Amino acid sequence: MAMVAQHQQHMETTSSSSSMKHQLDNGKYVRYTAEQVEALERVYSECPKPSSLRRQQLIRECPILSNIEPKQIKVWFQNRRCREKQRKEASRLQTVNRKLSAMNKLLMEENDRLQKQVSQLVYENGHMRQQLHTASAVTDASCESVVTTTPQHSLRDANNPAGLLSIAEETLAEFLSKATGTAVDWVQMPGMKPGPDSVGIFAISQSCSGVAARACGLVSLEPTKIVEILKDRTSWYRDCRNLEVLTMLPAGNGGTIELVYTQVYAPTTLAPARDFWTLRYTTSLDNGSLVVCERSLSGSGGGPHAAPSAQFVRGEMLPSGYLIRPCDGGGSIIHIVDHLNLEAWSVPEVLRPLYESSKVVAQKMTIAALRYIRQIAQESSGEVVYGLGRQPAVLRTLSQRLSRGFNDAINGFNDDGWSLMSCDGAEDVIVAINSTKNSNSLSFLGGVLCAKASMLFQNVPPAVLVRFLREHRSEWADFNVDAYSAASVKASPYGYPGMRPTRFTGSQIIMPLGQTIEHEEMLEVIRLEGHAVGQEDPFVSRDIHLLQLCSGVDENAVGACSELIFAPIDEMFPDDAPLIPSGFRIIPLDPKSGDLKDALATTHRTTLDLTSSLEVGPSTNHGPADTLTTRSVLTIAFQFPFENNLADSVATMARQYVRSVINSVQRVAMAISPLGMSPSLCPKVSPGSPEAVTLAQWICHSYMYHLGSDLVSSGSVAGESLLKDLWQHQDAILCCSLKSLPVFIFGNQAGLDMLETSLVALQDITLDKMFDDAGRKALFPEFAKIMQQGFAYLPGGICMSTMGRHISYEQAIAWKVLAADESTVHCLAFSFVNWSFV
């Protein structure tokens, strides 16, 4: 009996010990001391996911962890990662909730405003019906009374504080009625739909005097900071040349009244610049909102600098401004109104759509202001990725200097030192010279010369043309002329004068510096690789570096102009490097169409087809029913440094070079026009590759051959419909060559978005650049499996874009792409499923 009891007790002890061990193995009942948690946290901050060897090393190096099993250490890191993920997700959801609440409030206010507008229109409609049945004498009297109610603010006395305050209060009332009321008949900006992920709500005037645009948005900055940024118009409005506050007076409620003189660049050589003489009123409302409103003091007179203003046409600013309301939980809601009369009579008739279009004002001023504020907010929160170690403020300054230098060259103001040179009888190219524009850091001691021209294009999408000029520089540029300009910033004994023969290798490497939050503007460094001809200085680098600004490459943007501006820089350019910008600007003109909605739809369809053809295959013929006569004005300005004794020679060279560039651009424009009869100039996917349509068929056919299912679900089996489906596939599809160092040769739209690159720049990226060391070690052993069985499923992981951002994906599928004979392997294809930026 005693032996039975002893045996039973032994069994219970053994069972209890086994149970405790099982519980410890499952991570239960383990309690860590504060010292142990601190040691683990230090390791977690350096490596959130340590390997098995790293965990064992940790136990050996930290005696306080010696009593903890390696499996428990692994469980602790798993739990820690889970808590971190939950914390980030909770924080993200709180931010999204605050944003949605504020956006919902904004949309409800917009809905109330629209309801008031509908009620007012119904009332006016009934009133007009009643007027039609009255006597003609009464009708005349009513019309006369309407005319006499128009405010005549220009007749007020603006020479004393009382008169200025009266104008300011009137301006405030009229601005608020436009920002939150029904004073202007606003309609939604085409192509800009409001929503939780949108930048804001945008509208343009449908019928009012002048041109007007309105924007509402949510920004995570305090109202006072926003006012400070927006009042500094030269920092965000690229067309603003100068803003000078001449007088500042105190007003009631702690507000201020300012008399402001503003100069605005002309966008093309075919039109004069504009200036404005305005009153600006800054004040606060009873609900805590801040207001900055502004209007012209008179239509033509007033303002300083009578002599320099001879190159300007005086424009009129009707009550405009900014209303900034603080939000619960931080941030602000902004209302922006821009209402102008740009005096369209002063420009040639073909350009008048630029000065009569509310969409142009919306893109250049209203939307630009809101985007700039959001950009500053994201930079302040640390959400912006830096490029090549440059701070966002430095990159913004470089972009502004490029844009300002290009605008200065186009306008050629006398007070900047520009003067016209005598021409050779042909007026297609204007040559201006500026002998005062030099710097001690330039090797040229004479000055800068500018050759510029403007022309009209039809049926050429500006975004597509600029994208082609950016990606195919060798089609229009002369490498030796670039080398001549680059010599001005090279502080070396090999600088010019004296043109040294150099051969361009054809290789253009694009290195991104940074881009705005919606990718509407990209700043990048371009390296053009060149080699010396002959044996002279064979080891001297002939590479040329350019700082380049590219904007307006989104063909779906309404009213936006497209630009490609570049300037030579030294390889190790400092933040204050001298810049002599040149480039292209293409501004779309409103189509001559009776139905704006149909015109926009046709433009979008035509441009989308052109873009697909340009990027992934040959162009297609469009019938007359599929095309719309769209017009745009192209302005070219190229600047060249010169020495005093060589001014005439450089002017001759500049004039001939710009004419050759114009011919090249016209040839390209004819090729990409839907009505053009020339064959497409678009390159194949890569040298030696099949056309894009054929490659798409090989990719999809090989996927079915190896994996037994369709890659695209639409049922397309061949032709351009299959290429379009592959191009728009939601997963990132990339193809790389079969080399010792695989290079990408093709990617669909999602693949290019994931790598943050273009189809041409993609061909300079190798497969190994996507992954870190761990990713490469995990990927390369799978190549043998892919080559043996034709495909492989790869587990989820992390890769990296060209901008240095980390990308997570749930799974990757790799397969061999077979040629038409199904025996030759052309390349490898990868499909990254459910990818997203970390």
Image: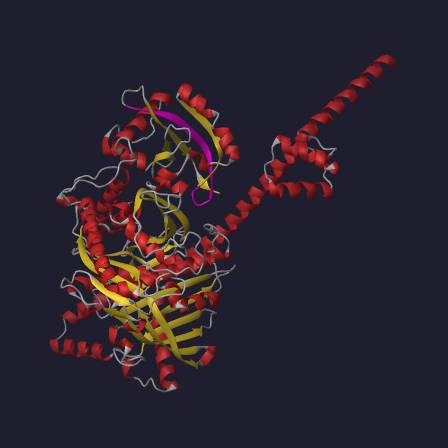
Of helix, strand and loop, which mostly describes the magenta segment? strand
Q: Is residue 251 left or right of residue 610?
A: right
Residue 135: image location, x then y, percent: 12, 75
The residue shown at (42%, 74%) is 282
Residue farthest along the right direction in this orientation: 2
Residue 118 appears anywhere in the view:
no
The picture quadrant where one finds residue 790 is top left
Position of 245 relative to 616 (above/below): below
Q: What sort of colour scheme is used for the picture?
A: secondary structure
The residue shown at (55%, 42%) is 85
Residue farthest along the left direction in this orientation: 136
Residue 315 appears anywhere in the view:
yes
Residue 167: image location, x then y, percent: 35, 80
Range of the magenta residues? Answer: 801-819
Residue 683: image location, x then y, percent: 26, 38
Residues 744 and 714: in front is 744
The picture quadrant where one finds residue 704 is top left
The picture quadrant where one finds residue 442 is bottom left
Residues 427 and 344: in front is 427
Residue 445: image location, x then y, percent: 35, 65
Is residue 743 highlighted in magenta? no
Position of 140 relative to 449 (above/below): below
Residues 312 and 809: in front is 312
Q: Is residue 675 left or right of residue 510?
A: left
* Number of numbered discs overlaid on the protein picture: 0
